[in-house]
Amino acid sequence: MQRNQTNYLTYGSMMIALFAILLAMSVYVPVLGFFTSFIVPLPLAWYCAKFERKQTAFVTVIAVILSFIIGGVFGFIFGLLVGPLGFIIGDSIRTKKSKLYMLMASGLFLLLMTAVQYILSILFFNLNVLEQFITSIEVYYEQLGNIMSSVGQVPKGYDELVKQSIILIKSIMPSYFIGAVFISAWLYLIINLSLLKRLKLDVPKFSKFMDFRLPKAVLWYYLIVSIFSLIVTFEVGTFGYLVFVNAALILRALLFLQGVSFIHYYFYVKGLSKWLMILATCFAVPLYMFTIIVGVLDLGFNIRGFIKDRYKK
C-alpha cells in the first residue's frame, strides 16, 4: 500500500512537471509550440492509464491549475482542453474502451469545451471569433468588388450573390465547426496513441477504413432530409433553414466516407494496387455526389456481401 502511494505521488509529480514543460513550450515557443501542442496530453494520458481514476483526477486538476500559473488566461484555456483530454485518453486505455469510444468521448468533450469557451469569450471579453471571421470575408468581397469595378468587370447581381454567399457561410458554420473539432480529436488520438504504444501501453486500434460501416439509420435520416428538401421550402436565414442545411451537409459527409470506404473494400477484394486505390480516392473528391450515391447503395443493399461472394468463387 505504501509503495503504491509512493508511486502515485512520484509519477504524479513527474507527469505534472512534464505536462507543464510541454504546455509552456506550446504557449511561448512560436513554431515548435505548434507541434508540442498535440502532445501536451501525453503525460496525463500515460499516468491515467497506469493509476486509478480518483488519483488521476486529482493529478489532472493540479495540472490544469498549474497551466494558469504558467501561461496566464491563454494557458489556462488551453490547459482546460488538453488536461481533461489526457485524462479521457488514459482512462479509456485503462478501462479497455474501444478507439471509437475514445474518439467520440474526446470529440464531444472538445466540442463542449470549445462551445463554452466561445460563449465566455463573448460574455467576458466581448470577443466573437466567428463574427470577426464573417467580417473579414465581407471585407474581402468588398475589396474584390472594388477591384472588379475599377476595371469594369463587375458581374451582374454581384451584391446579391455576395449576400447569399455570406448567408450560406453563416448557415454551414456549425457543421464545419463540428467537423473541425472531431478532426482535431482524431489528430490528438493518432499522435498520442502512437507515442503511448511506444511506451509499452496496450492501446486500442481503429479497424481498417475499408471496414467502415455507418448504421443504417443514417440512410433513413438522409432520405427524410432529401424528401423534406423537395416538399418544404425554408426561408433563407431561418432556424429551419439552418437545421436543414447543416443536417444535409453532415449526412452527405458521412455517406461520402461510406462511399470511399466501399472503394477501398472493392480494391482490396480485387487485389488491386494500393496506388490505384489512392488514385481512386483522390478522384472521389471531385466526384463527390457520385461517391455519395455509392455510399447510399453500399449502405442500403449490402453490395460488399455480393462482391465478396463473387470474388471468393
Image (tube, rainbow, N blue to C red):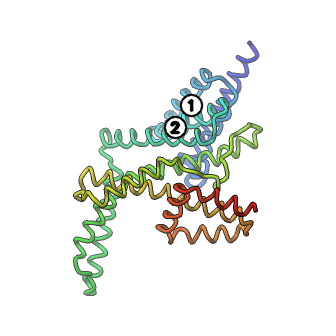
Label 1: which secondary element:
helix
Q: Which residue is mark 1?
A: 63
Q: Determine which quarter of the picture holds residue 139.
A: bottom left
Residue 152, how many percent across, how many down? 25, 87
Question: Going 32% across and 69% down the picture, which residue do you hit?
Answer: 140
Residue 40, how many percent across, how many down? 60, 41
Classify the position of the C terminus by image quarter: bottom right
Kindly identify the amino acid type of the residue bearing the numbered disc 1. Answer: Ala
Label 2: which secondary element:
helix
Numbered badge on residue 292: none
Classify the position of the N terminus by image quarter: top right
Give the tally of numbered discs. Answer: 2
Kindly identify the amino acid type of the residue bearing the numbered disc 2. Answer: Gly
Question: Going 31% across and 55% down the picture, which residue do you hit?
Answer: 228
Task: Report the side of 163 relative to 77 (left or right).
Answer: left
Label 1: how many Cα within 10 Å (few below 14, some 14–19, many 20+): many
Q: Up-down: is 167 above or below 79?
A: below
Q: Up-down: is 36 above or below 113?
A: below
Task: Report the side of 65 relative to 228 (left or right).
Answer: right
Task: Report the side of 138 relative to 5 (left or right).
Answer: left
Residue 28, how many percent across, how many down? 54, 47
Question: Going 24% across and 53% down the picture, which residue do you hit?
Answer: 238
Q: Are marks 2 and 1 in contact (CB under 8 Å)?
A: yes
Viewer-nearest residue: 98 or 158: 98
Q: How much space separates mark 2 and mark 1, taking CA atoms?
A: 8 Å
Viewer-nearest residue: 264 or 203: 264
Label 2: how many Cα within 10 Å (few below 14, some 14–19, many 20+): many
Residue 97, how many percent across, how many down? 63, 34
Q: Which residue is mark 2?
A: 79
